[in-house]
Amino acid sequence: MNTAAQTISRREALQSTILWGTAAWLCGCALPKSEVGEDSVRSVWSPRISLAQWTFHRAIKSGALDPMNFAPFAMEQVGVRGVEYVNTFYRSMPSDGAWVNQLRQRAQGAGVESLLIMVDIEEMLGAPSAQARREAVDAHRRWLDVASALGCHSIRVNALGEGDAASQVALCADGMSLLCEHAAKQGLWVLIENHGGCSCDGAWVTDVVRTSGAKNLGTLPDFGNFKCTDGSERDRYAGVEAMLPFARALSAKSHDFAADGSELHTDYSRMLRLAQSANYSGWIGIEYEGKVLGEVDGARRTRDLLLRLGCRI
């Protein structure tokens, strides 16, 4: 099958998934549960490892890494075959879309699949006024077009608004629903990450998803990002567990490593058991944010830990 046919088939599959809804997708992708322990996870469950572009934000911002070369770089330096882009590295690019074709071609040439785009620094989808929410949706639509052209399955957005947590559920759900209407026409999902504001509470994120009623609205649980604006920190395991039933991507956030290769802040084995128990069958993305190791080294350490726990390239 040629590349164009593969892209069409993937989009047709995504559109069919959206039509039938999240429940049908979960039934179709169910995986057997196993007993607790690394050996059991390794023997029956083997999700693929991807790489988030934010891992190399320092190299990109310094000019050491051209964001247009991210996919080949990810393959050459870390050995992964799936990548997750960050929109802020491409916001200054022309609107004609020629650069998107180049980005796609470079990924395909490296044998790398473009999975999603993380969208930041756009208007608030949970803004207080209906007009502001519509404007936020319009601002995000550019990235739906880019994601579609790249062959991604999703864009990741932020559930941000104003007011108390309860009122923000309704406002964010409305903005998400409007955006999901446009995304569905392109066979795309919209994913909410725990990434600031009320989203530090995983249960709050799932409330937004349920309230929206959109069949193509899901989550991207991050192993970290559970610090709230008041300085408190929610339980990361409870937060990830709450979001996993709606997850279409998963971010393996890492900072520091022990001598045995384990991550010092997150029990990766426990996180992967939660994902397996929730029948998660998507990619698990490396997102290294530490400062002790270099970005390539940190990405490789995270990769090696995931491989040790049964994931695969």
Image (tube, rainbow, N blue to C red):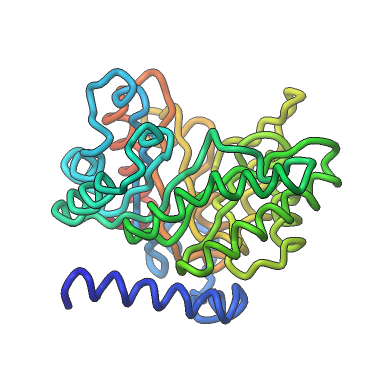
Q: Is residue 234 left or right of residue 306?
A: right
- Residue at image position (56%, 59%) is 247
Which residue is more in the foreground, 217 or 30? 217
231 w.r.t. 31: above or below: above
Which residue is more in the foreground, 81 or 144? 144
- Residue at image position (28%, 35%) is 67
What percent of the width, then of the height, locates residue 91?
40, 35
Q: Quadrant location of residue 48?
A: bottom left
What percent of the width, then of the height, locates residue 224?
56, 37
What percent of the width, then of the height, locates residue 174?
73, 55
Q: Quadrant of the C terminus?
A: bottom left
32 w.r.t. 200: above or below: below
Which residue is more in the foreground, 251 or 44? 251
Q: Is residue 166 left or right of residue 119?
A: right
- Residue at image position (62%, 70%) is 215
- Residue at image position (18%, 44%) is 72
The number of discs equals: 0
275 w.r.t. 124: above or below: below
Q: Quadrant of the N terminus?
A: bottom left
What percent of the width, then of the height, locates residue 188?
48, 64
Q: Is residue 286 left or right of residue 228?
A: left
